[in-house]
């Protein structure tokens, strides 16, 4: 199982003074200082050819930095920056991604797996990881996250369930889990890694919501700190880089790093927005030099928000104690505010916060509003948040919290598998009414947003419970992505699927 990885490319990062350097930022600064006249793409030519309304919207500085460097200069600066990122996050090799953690999931699964390979994967996977399974042709062995018995919130995949899946599927080539979840819950990664490594199987973590982990001891440990072999993390979500910017981290030993590097090149644009990549570099430098202090402040602000919100009538907040988890299993910067005690759905509460109070939550589901506290927050922003919720609470008479299905709960439990995701995706399909879809084999993804976990995945048999959930979600205005019919009156199902009797079928 173990593959000796190729050595990372020779980098000139050693010529720099270390963490205080930002190679991509510096090379862009030099370009601008030389006042170069470009005869290359992008065609807006430092903004001179851009529409005036666009320049007014985003500012001339973005266009001035959106340039094309010669390939050698760009490649050297990127390698230097990636080497410094690997050191900051504890990896052997890291890759900057210009299309978010989604593209990291695609690249990693494409590079680490081959068609027909079995992979033990948590069923609360993001849709991009499912897309990676389609690209690679791998066969998922889904493992359901454990659920809190009263709250219905996923508390992560249990190491014992991973062990059982590996015992039943000894040919599995990979374990893939999501941690932390959209709701801030971290899996017991150290135990999962131990279970997998005992069997010689590498572990990949979709750590999109955990770029800040590893920079403060009061946060859950990062994936790389627990010994995971690879992780993808979204620097844009919590540490301040531009949207779409993420990093894929790899550890040598159990993975073919050269093959994964090739997959990264195959799946990334050859015309990246350099300010986007430079923003990763700048944020890496800031976190390496000052991350602990910044997160100290962030954690204090998150604690302040919790103390104030929890005393408002009708509100409840998720935290480690309420979920029965230790502090190492929950990210306190994620505020999951249950508003069902106000007689509201999370979707309705989010709409009110946006339209009436000019506040933009991260998202909502049928029960909760989800808000992020990051290094960009201040005491003033926390006061605005508290004031808006206080105004909502003052208008409502508290009621008994409703029991509503969560998009991270039992509705994403594994269903019987009839086909691989790839085979179902490419199979002939037909549209059937959602109300009559139970027993059919899904040919498309149906994904509530947020959090982006597919309720229906290609190749799974559609269950009555999932039909009921989607009907309920559609009625209450939940945003759904993936289905060819955006109204979800119909879904695409496989025409006459061949049911497999292989050991991985469930």
Image: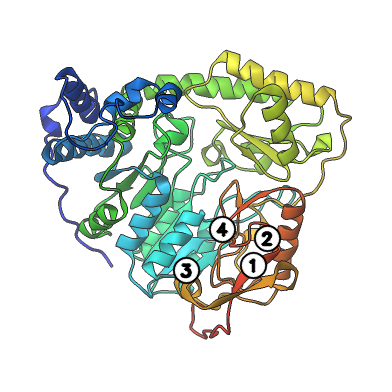
Residue 312 visible in image:
no
Sequence-first disc among 4 and 2: 4
Q: Secondary structure at mark 1?
A: strand
Q: Nearer the viewer, residue 61 or 501?
A: 61
Q: Which residue is mark 1?
A: 491
Mark 2 to mark 3 CA distance (whole Å):
26 Å
| 3 or 4: mark nearer the eye | 4
Q: Position of residue 258 (x, y in %)?
A: 20, 57
Residue 260 visible from this viewpoint: yes
The local crowd at label 3, few if under 14, some if 14 to 19, many if 20 or more residues have their Cα within 10 Å, is: many
Residue pointed to by mark 4 = 482
Determine which quarter of the picture holds residue 354.
Answer: top right
Residue located at (64% from left, 22% from top): 305
Badge 2 or badge 3: first in the primary sequence: 3
Is 468 in front, or is 221?
Answer: 468
Residue 418 quadrant: bottom right
Instruction: Pick out the residue farthest to the top.
Output: 380
Which is closer to the viewer, label 2 or label 3?
Answer: 2
Of the numbered discs in the image, which one, if any, rests on residue 140? 3
In space, the residues marked 1 and 3 are separated at their CA atoms by 22 Å
Estimate the spatial distance between the alpha carbons at disc 2 and disc 1, rounded to whole Å: 6 Å
Q: Please tell me which residue is depicted at 41% across the width and 74% down the height of the picture.
A: 170
CA gap, disc 3 to disc 4? 20 Å
Q: Residues within 10 Å of mark 4 (few under 14, many from 20)?
A: some
> Up-down: is 459 above or below 19?
below
Tell me the tag on residue 488.
2
């Amino acid at each position: 199982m173990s593959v000796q990885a190729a050595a990372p490319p020779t980098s000139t990062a050693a010529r720099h003074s270390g963490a205080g350097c930002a190679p991509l930022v510096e090379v862009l600064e030099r370009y601008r200082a030389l006042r170069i006249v470009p005869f290359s793409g992008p065609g807006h030519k430092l903004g001179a050819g851009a529409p005036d309304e666009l320049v007014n919207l985003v500012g001339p500085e973005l266009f001035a930095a959106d340039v094309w460097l010669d390939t050698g200069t760009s490649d050297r600066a990127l390698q230097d920056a990636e080497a410094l990122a690997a050191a900051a996050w504890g990896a052997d090799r890291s890759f900057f991604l210009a299309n978010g953690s989604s593209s990291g999931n695609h690249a990693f699964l494409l590079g680490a797996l081959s068609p027909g390979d079995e992979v033990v994967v948590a069923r609360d996977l993001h849709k991009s990881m499912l897309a990676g399974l389609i690209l690679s042709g791998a066969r998922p062995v889904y493992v359901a996250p454990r659920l809190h018995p009263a709250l219905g919130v996923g508390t992560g995949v249990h190491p014992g369930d991973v062990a059982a899946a590996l015992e039943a599927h000894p040919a599995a080539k990979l374990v893939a889990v999501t941690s932390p979840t959209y709701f801030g819950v971290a899996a017991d990664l150290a135990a999962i890694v131990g279970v997998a490594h005992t069997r010689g199987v590498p572990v990949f973590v979709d750590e999109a919501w955990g770029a800040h982990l590893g920079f403060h001891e009061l946060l859950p440990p990062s994936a790389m700190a627990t010994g995971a072999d690879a992780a993808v993390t979204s620097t844009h979500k919590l540490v301040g880089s531009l949207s779409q910017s993420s990093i894929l981290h790899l550890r040598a030993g159990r993975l073919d790093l050269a093959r994964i590097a090739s997959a990264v090149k195959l799946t990334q644009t050859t015309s990246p927005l350099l300010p986007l990549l430079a923003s990763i570099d700048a944020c890496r430098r800031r976190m390496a030099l000052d991350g602990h202090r910044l997160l100290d402040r962030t954690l204090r602000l998150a604690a302040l928000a919790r103390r104030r919100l929890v005393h408002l009538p009708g509100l409840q907040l998720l935290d480690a104690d309420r979920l029965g988890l230790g502090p190492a299993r929950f990210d306190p910067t994620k505020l999951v505010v249950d508003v069902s005690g106000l007689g509201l759905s999370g979707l309705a509460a989010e709409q009110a916060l946006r339209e009436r109070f000019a506040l933009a939550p991260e998202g909502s589901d049928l029960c909760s509003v989800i808000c992020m506290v990051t290094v960009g927050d201040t005491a003033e922003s926390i006061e605005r948040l508290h004031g808006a919720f206080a105004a909502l609470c003052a208008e409502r008479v508290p009621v008994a919290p409703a029991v509503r299905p969560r998009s991270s709960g039992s509705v994403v439990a594994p269903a019987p598998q009839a086909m691989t995701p790839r085979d179902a995706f490419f199979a002939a399909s037909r549209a059937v009414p959602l109300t009559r879809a139970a027993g059919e084999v899904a040919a498309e993804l149906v994904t509530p947003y947020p959090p982006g976990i597919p309720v229906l995945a290609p190749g799974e048999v559609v269950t009555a419970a999932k039909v009921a959930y989607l009907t309920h979600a559609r009625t209450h205005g939940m945003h759904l992505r993936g289905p060819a019919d955006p109204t979800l009156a119909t879904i695409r199902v496989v025409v006459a699927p061949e049911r497999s009797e292989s050991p991985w079928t469930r």
